[in-house]
Image (cartoon, grey):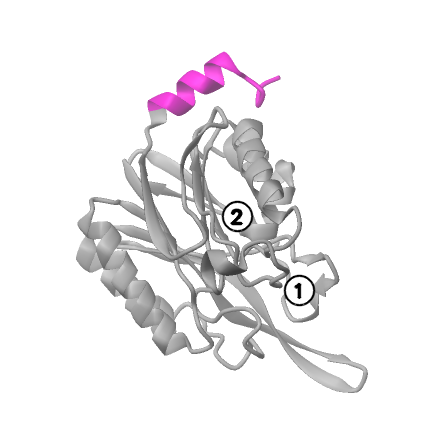
Amino acid sequence: MKIAAVQLTSTADTATNLALASERIREAAAQGAQLIVLPEATSQNFGSGRLDGQAQELDGDFATTLQALAKELGVTVVVGMFRPADTVEREGKKINRVFNTALIVGPDVRRGYDKIHTYDAFNYRESDTVVPGTQLVTFSVGDLTVGVSTCYDIRFPEQFKALARSGADIVVVPTSWADGAGKLEQWRLLTAARALDSTSYIVAAGQARPGGSAEAGKESGPTGIGHSVIVAPDGKRLVEAGYEEEIIYAEVDGDTVREIRKAIPVLKN
């Protein structure tokens, strides 16, 4: 099966981002991709203001439009968005929190995975405005099972092993990874390590680096470092993007997963 990881730069406006995502999905489908993964925060980029103003449920325009497109093209799409969650009061202020959701749409599916591990690290507190999810999610594309995680989840190997034990051959990772000192090295290590931990394909689609390679290595906040990657179950990077917007592709198959799990039975051991 051919899979695609779409690396783009989303904006502050959901309608603009929906049009961009639709264009990239059409491009990937035209190249034969059956599973197409887009970044975290595709519906609204981080650093552009409050997330609750454009948050939508799964029956909103963002999700239903993308499902209609997936049905038209005969593909399955995973893409980052935000959904309304709850309202809390903090220091006399009411905060409308959201779920950081990976939307899954296909001809016969529209559901979401809510990011379990909120990014409370490096002086950033995602949990102030985002409610963590509690449920693992898998779905099927053809004869392959796909697990879902999001960005900071990649630092937690237990989640990836649990998805693999639930049958996942592939784990997709919509991402908006921060740039800065050591961050690219960490990203490369973590994506390879999670493939090895779970003996699964890792398909990580990230936000492109704002400003491109000219800004590489500078502190960015959680707005993207690029370097989307598809990793084989043995930890080999099959294809990796750079800092700019692009789409990367790879062929995956269940036989490879089964062969590697037989040779390296870490999930059983």
Q: Is residue 192 at all visible to an observer of this figure?
A: yes
Which residue: 44% across, 42% down?
Answer: 229
Does residue 148 sit above or below 48 in this rendering? Answer: above
- Point 35% across, 76% down: residue: 16
Residue 122: percent from the left, percent from the top? 73, 57
Is residue 153 placed above or below 237 in the rendered structure? below
Determine which residue is flagged by label 2. Answer: 149
Residue range in magenta is 255-269
User: Is disc 2 surrounded by few (<14), some (14 to 19) or many (20+) residues within 10 Å?
Assistant: many
Quadrant hosting residue 126: bottom right
**Residue wearing tag 1:** 126
Q: Are marks 2 and 1 in contact (CB under 8 Å)?
A: no
Secondary structure under badge 2? loop
The residue nearer to you, when weighing 27 against 97, is: 27
Query: Which residue is at a point 51% across and 70% down the rendered structure image?
Result: 83
Foreground of the two, 220 or 60: 220
Q: Position of residue 182 (x, y in %)?
A: 65, 46
